[in-house]
Image (cartoon, rainbow, N blue to C red):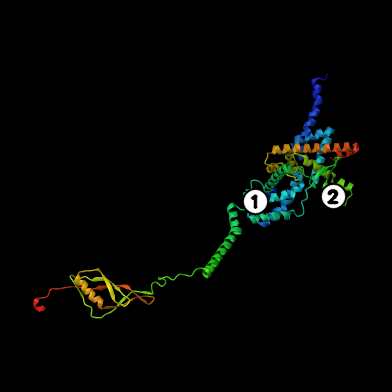
Amino acid sequence: MASQHELEQQMQPERECVAAQAAFSSYLDGALSGVEMGRIADHLQGCVPCAAEFEGWRAMQTALADMGPARPPQRLQQQIKTALGEERERGSNLPLSGRVALTWRSSVAPLAVQTAGGMAAAVLLAAGLFRLFGPGVAVQANDDGMAQVIAPHYLYSQVPPTAVETGRDVPVLIDAKVDTQGRVYDYTILEGPADPSVQLQVEQNLLSSVFKPATVFGVPVDGHVMVTYTGVSVHAYPHALRS
Amino acid sequence: MSDLASAIGMRAEEQELVRELKSGSEPAFALLIAQYSQPIYSLIARSLRDPSEAADVTQEVFVKVFRSIRGFHGDASLRTWIYRIALHETSNQRRWWNRHKRQELAIDAPIENEEGECTCMAETLAACDASPFELFLRTETRQRVEAALRLLPAAYREVVVLREIEGFGYEEIAEILNVNLGTVKSRLTRGRAALRESLKKNDLERALHTGSTAVADTLEAVI
């Protein structure tokens, strides 16, 4: 039976091989300390299996390096440039505000101009068609600001008009109705005294007055006219003067 | 010029390029494409199980760069940032591939015949100037390494490709993958060991198929 010491001596090289092989990767890259590099180099010099294994690692590294870069397809760069051109048109490298502005400029704005133009053309066309085929404009009395409707106005009096004697000095405002002959056929006292003596004086004045009758488009019609008479109060005279 | 001055000069140059890229300058993006499309394609082609997807994924990487360059604040170098996007896209593509295309056969994907030989369907379809034997000698090693590389778990494959083929340092790999330095070293050790085991197993199988220990010994010496 082997003693503990003999067993340890047998396992020692094996442990060294395991440790050396575990460090092959770093050893290939020179990523070990100087002491560790020296220890592995010493081990490889004295251990044929590990030296052969390390040669295999080194050959593998050489084979990987010899593979060189993979050759891209001939048109790869052009393919990428085309793709980036499409991205640029979409503005995918811009912030949200920039993308919205780009979208507006490239699609909505031209569409808006077209829409506005279309709408304007449609309105013009509709207006033209309406003018051509729509109903005629109805004649209205106020088309020319009532220019063709003329109220009656005073011409003259067949007898000299007289002042209307009233109890006090106030004017008498009358709404007189004038017929197509220019004569008053009715009246209403709107303001001022309306006692019978005043009415009599007013009637005498109105009956002798001649008016130009009201006209509509030159055709005489009945109309209204406002007439004002100056009211004169009656003064008391001395008896001697009255006789 | 000292290394420091050179580094400062490069940094200023990169900042100028980034400023131009952020403004959407077409010449700046043309420069970026000229500078990075090839290495990014290579990284992606080596990281994917189906390299025929590499061109489309590369295009997608540059589209992502274009869309998100405004968010680049210079915490890492521009190169590190682009490679990070590339590996992210590669990872997405791998997940998609695993879900949808695993069962499909790509014309350039390596296939294994009954004798265990690994060839591409494209090579069997296209005529080649070299004789079959010459073609075999020229491409045999590369194909075996590439095939073995594709069998590695993605986490190991990324580190091995970045270190052994793209030549990145440990620190930059850590930045690209957003992991710590110890993780990079650990993944690299495990990835290399797994790749080595895969190649050894492949050699052994080939030797058993041919029944020739001499061939096995020869290949063992090469790998």
Amino acid type of disc 1?
Arg
Foreground residue, A160 or B116? A160
User: Within 10 Å of the Cα at label 2, are there few (<14), some (14-19), or many (20+) other Cα atoms?
Assistant: few
Residue B75: image location, x then y, percent: 64, 46
Residue at x-position 84% and y-position 49%: B125
Is residue A180 visible from the viewing direction of this image? yes
Q: In the rendered image, which quarter contains the C terminus of chain B?
A: top right
The mark found on residue A98 in the picture is none
Query: Residue drawn at (78%, 29%), measured in percent from left and top?
Result: A15
Tell me the element at label 2.
Answer: helix
Task: Say if B78 sits above or below A242 in the image.
Answer: above
The quarter of the picture where residue A162 lies is bottom left
Q: Quadrant of residue B103?
A: top right
Q: Is residue B28 something one can see in this rendering? A: no
Residue occupied by mark 2: B125
Would you call the spot at circle 1 few (<14 residues within 10 Å), some (14-19), or many (20 or more)?
Answer: many
Q: Which mark is residue B67?
A: 1
Residue B71 placement, left or right of A229: right
Residue B102 falls left or right of residue A182: right
Expressed as whole percent of the image width and height from the top left, the position of residue B95 reads: 71, 42
Which is nearer the N-term, disc 1 or disc 2? Answer: 1
> How much space separates mark 1 and mark 2, taking CA atoms?
40 Å
Camera-side residue of B13 and B213:
B213
The one of B178 and A200 positioned closer to us in this rendering = A200
Labels 1 and 2 touching (C-beta < 8 A): no
Q: Residue furthest top?
A: A1
Q: Position of residue A201 (x, y in %)?
A: 21, 74
Task: Identify the amino acid type marked 2.
Answer: Leu
Asked which secondary structure carries label 1, the reply is helix
- Subunit of mark 2? B
